[in-house]
Image (cartoon, rainbow, N blue to C red):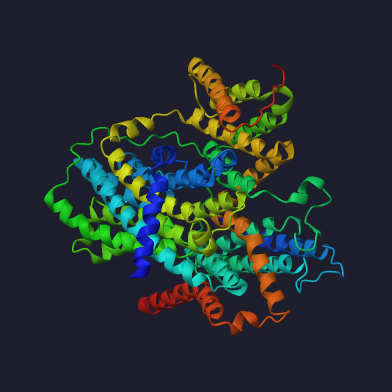
Amino acid sequence: MDALAQMFANLSMGFGVALTPWHLLAGVLGVVVGTAIGVLPGIGPAMTIALLLPITFGVKPVTAFILFGGIYYGAMYGGSTTSILVNTPGETASVVTTLDGYKMAKKGRGGAALATAAIGSFVAGTIATLGLMLLGTQLSEIALSFGPPEYFAIMLFALTVVTGLSGDSAPKTAFATMLGLGISMMGMDLQTGQPRYTFGIVELLGGIDVVTAAIGLFAICEVFWNAATFKRIQEEVIKTVGTLMMTRDEWKRSIFPWFRGSCLGFVIGVLPGAGATVATFLSYVMEKRLSKTPEEFGTGAIEGVAGPEAANNASCGGAMVPLLALGIPGSGTTAVMLAAFQMYGLRPGPLMFSQQPDLIWGLIASLYIGNVLLLVLNLPLIGLWVKMLETPKPLLFSSILVFSALGIYGLSGSLAEMLALFVLGGMAFFMRRHGFPMAPVVLGVVLGPMIEQEFRRALVMSVGDPSVFFTRPICLTILLFAVLSLLGPVIAQMWIARREKTAAK
Amino acid sequence: MKHDFTLAGIIIVFAGAYIAGAFMINETKTTFSAIGPRVFPILIGIGMLLSGVWLGWQTWLKRASGHKFADLEEIDWKTWGATALVFLVYIFIFEPVGYLISTALFLFIEARILGSRAWLRDALVSVVVSVAIYYFFNGLLKVGLPKGLL
């Protein structure tokens, strides 16, 4: 009971922080920008936050993270709009919504689809933020007893989960992660001062900046990709949405998917490395399995919108749990947020909960507020968001390139860094062409130095004895989970393939 | 996807190069940490190698079971090439020519490359956006942008 009271005290303090005019403004700006980029296909929260990393120099940490949190939640709200009305996902996480959402819109139930998405997102956001509050504090308490071996194990777990959950492209995801780690090794080794992979070039002594990597891999690559694959065919935009009211039947069919989606999304989000996309796919599959009318899925089943939309919002809150409580990203976007923390010289984790409660609780409070704002913004202003879709793409993408270059210039003032940006973007483009995911690379770049440091610290602690990883119970458990997350899906696939073979015989 | 086998080969070669690069790192005798600067890079290189082998194995299995390999997405090389080139030029002329002129020019030209045909609107927007960003960076973030020819 005492802990609960403490939590409410902290939350009240958080609201005090979040409700100051300046922070409220940041929050509003965050959710508006978030929704806007969610609506615009091709631009996502990870890219946007990466592009905004340079601003962290002029802005206080609390303000910046309130902004980023708003963008993160907002993007999930906005993504559903284009999925439902244009059959084009605004976010990769919104792909699933196109399956039934667009069909609903074509049948004239577009308004209901939008409503169920928005309300579901609100329910999910609230539940997830609640979960963040509860689980975050609990986890940070447990993490106080964590030492380098445990942190190393969790980061390794994050990387194996990303690979394990990537399905068919697991080996490519594995390489992407390794590449990210490899890139992070470039530069001067902080512990020994030895240059690594600098090829004698002085500018490389500082290594590749995380921001350059994030912007290059998310923004430049995306624009290059759009330039290369510009689809000339326009999907039919459904302009008349009809009423936004849902029928009683639609309400009834949405409620359970909302709650199921929220819980599933939150749990998936908490898993380090797994994010919104996985959550939405799993939610869709779950709703289809549990539905009494599975054949309706794909033609306009409202559960197919309600569940996944709740899941993707909940996964954002979930992803913030490992980020804030342990300092380990739960998704591609939170990996960029971690980069932001690093730029401020902050290390999220249990210490931050005790030393910078105003940041943590201010952020949590602003997420509650932002959630309400998003519900209010999204439904009445639907017309506005649809108008946004008419923004001329050429100018939009050109501006992204400009913003990217300027951001890097602003941070480094160097031509070399801008060239690195270009090279990384180009490399990412070719990788993407061949089916390699980008988020794990950024994850690797962000986590690389941290993992190595914890690895070294663990071995210094144990005076060179490697068994330290296997004799500490928590560490060992996490390592076992890591191995499981990597081998599990592979074995499952082989097992399923074998079953199919014997069934076919 | 097509070319996966070749990719696996490239990855393995790259991994080899990475590990070789790790051995080029100087290890002085005065390191007090138990782990020198080479250890992690070598581990990462091994990880890359394993992922390459994994990809090769997966592709081989798919081939053996008659899996149809997806074609790569169609790429408009002209548009991409033009974009990349113009962006590169933008980066190089940024400092000498100055922020405002290069940016306005870039926005206009790049929009055209990406398919826009509304000359006047684009020209106006290019200038307005450039100026707006200038105030944003200069005023709000206190970041200096090169004056160049102005």
Question: Residue at 76% of width from left, 59% of height from top?
Answer: A189
Q: Is residue B79 visible?
A: no
Find the residue positioned furthest to the right: B29
Of A30 and A385, which appears nearest the observer?
A30
Q: Is residue B140 left or right of residue A393?
A: right
Find the residue positioned furthest to the left: A248
Of A191 and A262, which appears nearest the observer?
A191
Of B90 and B57, which appears nearest the observer?
B90
Establish if B32 lies above or below A300.
below
Q: Quadrant of the C terminus of chain B?
A: top right
Q: Is residue A9 visible?
A: yes
Q: Position of residue B130 (x, y in %)?
A: 57, 23
Q: Is residue A287 left or right of residue B142?
A: left
* Quarter where residue A41 is shown: top left
Task: Please count the marks in the image.
Answer: 0
Q: Position of residue A456 (x, y in %)?
A: 70, 70
Of B14 and A475, which appears nearest the observer?
A475
Question: Residue at 26% of width from left, 36% of height from top?
Answer: A380
Question: Residue at 30% of width from left, 40% of height from top?
Answer: A378
Q: Position of residue A129 (x, y in %)?
A: 36, 56
* Quarter where residue A412 is shown: top right
Q: Is residue B148 left or right of residue A296?
A: right
Q: Position of residue A170 (x, y in %)?
A: 53, 64
* Quarter where residue A85 is shown: top left
Find the residue positioned furthest to the top: B120
